[in-house]
Image: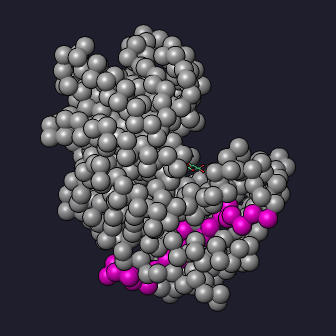
Amino acid sequence: MLGTETQRHPFLQGLSKHRGAPPTAIVIFGASGDLTSRKLVPAIYNLSVDNLLPPDFFLIGFGRKEMADEAFREAMTESVETYSRRELQKDIWERVCGNAFYHAGGYDQPGSYQVLRERIEGIEKDLGREVQTLFYISTPPSVFQPILENLGSSGLARRHRHSGFASKVVIEKPFGSDLESARELNRVITRQFDERQVFRIDHYLGKETVQDLLVQRFANSIFEPLWNRRYVECVQITVAEDIGVGSRGGYYEQSGAMRDMIQNHTMQLLSLTAMEPPVSLDPEAIRDEKVKLLKAIQPLNLGEKDADVVRAQYAEGLVGGKKVPGYTHEDGVAADSATETYAALRLTINNWRWSGVPFYMRSGKRLARRVSEIAVQFKRPPGILFSDAERFDLASNTMVIQIQPDEGTTLLLNSKIPGLETRTQPVKMHFRYRTTYGSNTPEAYERLLLDSMVGDSTLFIRGDETEASWKLISPILERWESFGRQGMESYVAGSWGPLAAERLLWNNRHEWRRAGP
Ligand code: BG6
């Protein structure tokens, strides 16, 4: 168990109270994949630096290709050297590596799971005590089902089921590709595991700023009274990236912005921004409110006239001064691809708090800059005193919660320009993580790995939550599929997206803000 020293670590003082993880063996399926080397292994390293791993911690990489334990450890070390936010400290890392093993096996071969089980039991025997097993599924979705079924039939899913050492399963995105496949995946999971053993990942929930959203909303008394239809004009959620699809063309062709970003990351930002205050910080209390919010969203208008959604693909353009190809010229992308690299939505939330307040969301690749933010735009005061536009340059008060990269919150206010005349201009009040907390904040995966080991599901998606989100998104995808490329807009790489996304807001006399601090 973690000692009292580590229990006091600030990282542990999260949304709910941590008690420390029991002895744990993590089995990573997809051990030679990109996510393992870029995110999971560096996260494990940083947890060990912070003394947050249980003293009895074991790592088993499960993958299809043959690899010796030593080669696996070397690959892990390389990934820490390349991707960790902190320098490699050999003494600490060697302790983790000493307990890391590689297990080659087929995801659909029952025999591999029997051997895995024996291996875990061997660890317990040597240790002289039980360990919990955390199965981290980070493979392509096509093998989710065989892995889950084999975990069930081998008995691995039920190990120590009625103790504090019950197995847990962490499932990476994509969680289904539409409502039906998400439902089916939930059925497969719950045949083998209880919901309390299941941790569906959305790495945005592990971001510090996303967790801070609840603190900013509910630990300050100045915002919550304004957080409703009486004072809020609209809410804009932007998750913009400047990168293209890079080497992931094959994956992205099947996914597109809607499945890759909107259904999960952006919807999570929306539910945390708009949900009602939960009755407690208990995981179920928070997740209940998120589901209620998702269910209150009105089905979108997908008609040809005044539709609530826009989709687009990037065309050749300049990003950061460099010429980049259009989407259909990227590797692994069909020349006549009908996959959207940008999506924007106008949402209506039919509940007491938000009736009549439009929520706009957009996400895309190859946009002008990498920025994720939530902008709550407040109503303007009556135009009685400062209505002369010549003299009074006024902006709507806006609270911008900057998720990344320059984490923090900005409040847009109006102020008198010093001088003998009364002139005004908008000014910004900034709170920056960088200046207040320093720049070395934990990565999302550190938080999420620790929480899953501890069994805290607050920052994970519940089964009904993912279905509620798909229920909204699936009809859009069906509609788009039936249209093929018809209605696909285009935008120049390096711009802020297609003109059609601007039009989405004009009806309400709104416009997208220029995202950024
Ligand atoms: C992933 C998507 O879930 O999130 C990627 O598959 C995207 O396409 C990434 O680039 C963005 O994550 P972050 O943390 O860099 O904003």
Say if 213 sits above or below 407 in the image: below
The structure residue drawn at horizontal position 49% and vertical position 46%, both measured from the top left corner, is 143
> Magenta stretch containing residue 352, yes or no?
yes
Where, by quadrant of the figure, is residue 391 drawn? bottom right
Q: Position of residue 107 (x, y in %)?
A: 47, 38
- Horizontal placement of 491 versus 400: left or right? right
The structure residue drawn at horizontal position 54% and vertical position 68%, both measured from the top left corner, is 361
Residue nearest the viewer, comparing 390 with 265: 265
Q: From this viewpoint, which residue is outermost toward the left?
A: 162
The structure residue drawn at horizontal position 35% and vertical position 59%, both measured from the top left corner, is 187
Q: Position of residue 174 (x, y in %)?
A: 50, 53
Say if 222 sits above or below 384 in the image: above
The residue stretch that appears in magenta: 336-361
Q: How is the image coloured?
A: one colour
Q: Position of residue 420 (x, y in %)?
A: 60, 68
- From the image, which quarter does the C terminus lie in? bottom right
Where, by quadrant of the figure, is residue 136 drawn? top left
Residue nearest the viewer, comparing 17 with 180: 180
> Magenta stretch containing residue 458, yes or no?
no
- From the image, which quarter does the N terminus lie in? top left
The structure residue drawn at horizontal position 78% and vertical position 51%, both measured from the top left corner, is 330
- Horizontal placement of 363 versus 229: left or right? right
**Residue 291 at least partly seen:** yes
Say if 334 sits above or below 359 in the image: above
- Horizontal placement of 264 versus 1: left or right? right
Q: From this viewpoint, which residue is outermost toward the bottom?
A: 305
Q: Position of residue 469 (x, y in %)?
A: 43, 67
Residue nearest the viewer, comparing 24 with 394: 24
**Residue 204 at least partly seen:** no
Say if 122 sits above or below 179 in the image: above
- Horizontal placement of 7 versus 373: left or right? left
